[in-house]
Amino acid sequence: MRIRKAGKIAEHLWRLGTEESSVYLLEGNKTAAVISGGMNYIIPLVLRQIREFGIDEAKITHFIILHAHFDHMGIVPFFKRRRPQITVHASRRGWEVIANPKAIAVINKFSDLVAQKNCSGGEDLSSLDWQWRDDVQGKILEEGGKIDLGGMDVEIFETPGHSSCSITAYVRQEQFLFPSDAVPIPYKDDMVIAANSNFTQYQQSMEKLAGLKVKIIGADHYACIIGAEAGDYIGRAITAAREKRSVLNALLRKEGSVDQAAKSYIDNFFKNNPDYFVAPEIMLGVYRQMLKHLAEQHTSL
């Protein structure tokens, strides 16, 4: 079952933001953490939701960036500047990305691009200090690391593949899993594979997560997955990734080049899914990287 609306998902867990860009607030006995960072244009909505849902904002002392892509870190600078006592967490590689001025320029540019596409509600960001600069610092999260919220620990798994900096958060006590885009995106009734960085690592990372007991998957885009679907989602995702790899390899053989195969795939994808939240030019870059990896793997055999 997929929950697409914001609100309380389970005891101690809220989904905030919009259907296509959400973050999760996890509340322990002592402190609370916001898991993932969404997109910049959800800031006004998240502020309203915190008030309307009766969430104690002062209890939020942790922000966990699951990977350093623009659509998963958009609200972090605003909230860090609003409440300096918040500790921001990311992987070691994630902090390397955040420290790179060129990467930050791309993050801010893409944030603007997607905000223009999705701000249909008329949200005005001009008065909000949301852009990434060099003033946001924090702590490194690594494989096996934990954040204690009081009666609830957030465990960390390194899950590269979608990006080189991807991590997954897991709450063993509640069987909550927050993989961000390290697993397929639950778009409509389908799964969107986004193995931007390394398709092989993407598959290996899902194999790492496959043994975990899961009652809720807090996906960043489109839906929170609960119940029986959450329990078998990773297993089905592993199969879907294997099948997608075969489809893309066949497309490479048919089109004869990475660029042409990527264009063919994305043209067809947006023909069938014109409302997908990411601009076609961004998605084209994602699939170009995926196909490039597959082409290199084939060449090395």
Image: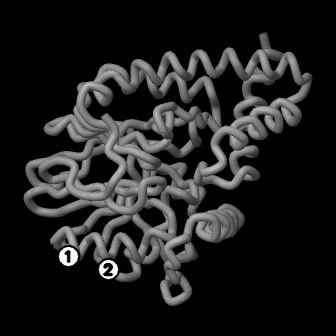
Q: Residue at x 34, y 39 (%)?
A: 2
Q: Is residue 81 above or below residue 172?
A: below
- Callout 1 environment at 10 Å: few (<14), some (14 to 19), or many (20+)? few
Quadrant where the N terminus lies?
A: top left
Residue beneath disc 2: 83
Q: Is residue 137 above or below residue 123?
A: above
Q: Give the secondary structure at mark 2.
A: loop
Q: Residues within 10 Å of mark 2 (few under 14, many from 20)?
A: some
The quadrant where residue 242 appears: top right
Q: Residue furthest bottom?
A: 127
**Left or right: 289, with 131 as reference point:** right
Q: Of the residues shown, which amino acid type is indicated by label 1?
A: Ala
Q: How far apart are marks 1 and 2 (CA)?
A: 8 Å
For the C terminus, the image quarter is top right
What's the residue at 24%, 56% (across, down)?
14
Amino acid type, label 2: Arg
Element carrying mark 1: helix
Mark 1, residue position: 58
Where residue 157 sits: x, y (%)?
Answer: 37, 36
The residue at the point 42 percent across, 73 percent down is: 43
Extreme right residue here?
Answer: 256
Q: Are marks 1 and 2 in contact (CB under 8 Å)?
A: yes
- The x, y position of residue 24, in whole percent, is 31, 55
Residue 295 position, x and y percent, is 80, 23
Q: Residue furthest top?
A: 301
